[in-house]
Amino acid sequence: MNNTLKAVQISNNIYWVGAIDWSMRNFHGYETSRGTTYNAYLILDEKVTLIDTVKAPFKDELLKRIASVVNPAKIDIIVSSHVEPDHSGALPFVKEYARNAEIITSHPNGLKGLTARYGNLNYKPVKAGDSISIGERTLQFVPTPMLHWPDSMVTYCPEEKILFSNDAFGEHLATSMRFDDENDLETILFEAKKYYANILMPFGKQALAALVSLGGHDIRMIATGHGVIWRQNIETILDCYSEWAGGEVQDRAVVVFDSMWGSTQILAQTITEAFAAKGIPAAYYDIKATPMSDIVTDIFTSKYLAVGSPTINNQMMPTIAAFLNYLKGLRPQNHKGFAFGSYGWGGQSVGQVEDEMKAAGIEIMLDKIRIANVPTPAQLEEIVKKITEMEVQ
């Protein structure tokens, strides 16, 4: 038995008691190269309160961290911010020890979701404006529906000025150090952007609404559901969320492609160089060499997108089809782009790529580029000319 798992104090009588998943590398198709944490928090007050649990396989880690500061049987209240199993999976397990604990969840969706997954565990649903006293401290509940599930909510403790933010402001990052100022800020912000781009991007309006609803709160710490706890760079992450939720994009291009025998790759190289010559920084991604989630992170704040595929069996390459399907689900905003590709005889892929780009909300700014067999120097020069003369705003 591992008895070295301890709670980490983050404020007076408030502890992080979550779990670190060093080995996780995929989250619903989103590659998590740095693992993640499942954050849960324990407040010792007149009523001992646990905010969230962890993914079920890590339930013993959670219990041991709780037991390092208090007998789990003494937990009076469990706040379940979000039904998704990476936050609620250990709830039935904890309830076996904290038999009398009341579980607070959002009304009506949290109540519906937890009941459907775990049966009746003594729930108390709350809505916007509700709060409870746990002794010296108060917990205020703020619904954040569709950030990123209908049941999502955050919890604010005014006496401590701590926002328990669940999925907002977090990142998939496994680290032994709990706070933002104990880790490399550039890495944290990249992972926070990647998290937003691959999970929260479709919910920009809801993110803006959440920021507005939290605007009147004095926040000195953001205790997230994943990754680090913000205490030093709170304004930085709030500013980032305002920018990301507003759909702000930069004068930057992303070129994504797959290639069979090199022709589409030559087109991708030419397009990347043409953007750069036009004064627009461009990133070049071979879909086989870079995870989709990393590419999407770059696309997220880049104004221009070019996607290329050769034709195989009258279709685009399966890799590009999967990428565009993934992108379509994220519903990017304020992007412009075009399709390109090579073919032997049919050439259907380029039109299919363009159609999928349109379906993803990409404004088509240049007619599709279709090249039979191997591009000639004259054809490549024509592509450069098209991009050079392309109107950008």
Image (cartoon, grey):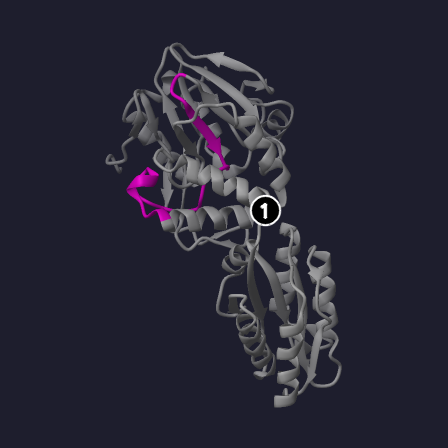
Over which residues does the magenta segment extend?
159-185
Q: Which SS class for mark 1?
A: helix
Looking at the rendering, in which quadrant would you find the C terminus? bottom right
Looking at the rendering, in which quadrant would you find the N terminus? top left
Q: Is residue 65 above or below residue 130?
A: below
Q: Is residue 152 visible?
A: no
Q: Which residue is located at x 47 percent, y 17 percent?
A: 139
Q: Is residue 43 visible?
A: yes
Amino acid at dot 1 = Met
Q: Residues within 10 Å of mark 1 (few under 14, many from 20)?
A: many
Residue 299 point in image, percent of width and height: 56, 58
Magenta span contains residue 167: yes
Q: Is residue 301 above or below residue 146?
A: below
For the stretch drawn in magenta, the main secondary structure is loop
Residue 267 point in image, percent of width and height: 60, 79
Residue 29 point in image, percent of width and height: 54, 54
Q: Is residue 101 above or below residue 387?
A: above
Towards the viewer: 257 or 61: 257
Towards the viewer: 136 or 23: 136
Q: Is residue 45 left or right of residue 111?
A: left
Towards the viewer: 291 or 100: 291
Q: Which residue is located at x 41 percent, y 55 percent?
A: 33
Asked where in the image residue 121 lies, by quadrant, the reply is: top right
Please give the count of numbered marks on the rendered protein: 1
Residue 156 point in image, percent of width and height: 47, 23
Magenta span contains residue 221: no
Q: Is residue 191 left or right of residue 66?
A: right
Q: Which residue is located at x 57 percent, y 81 percent?
A: 266
Report the residue marked by disc 1: 201
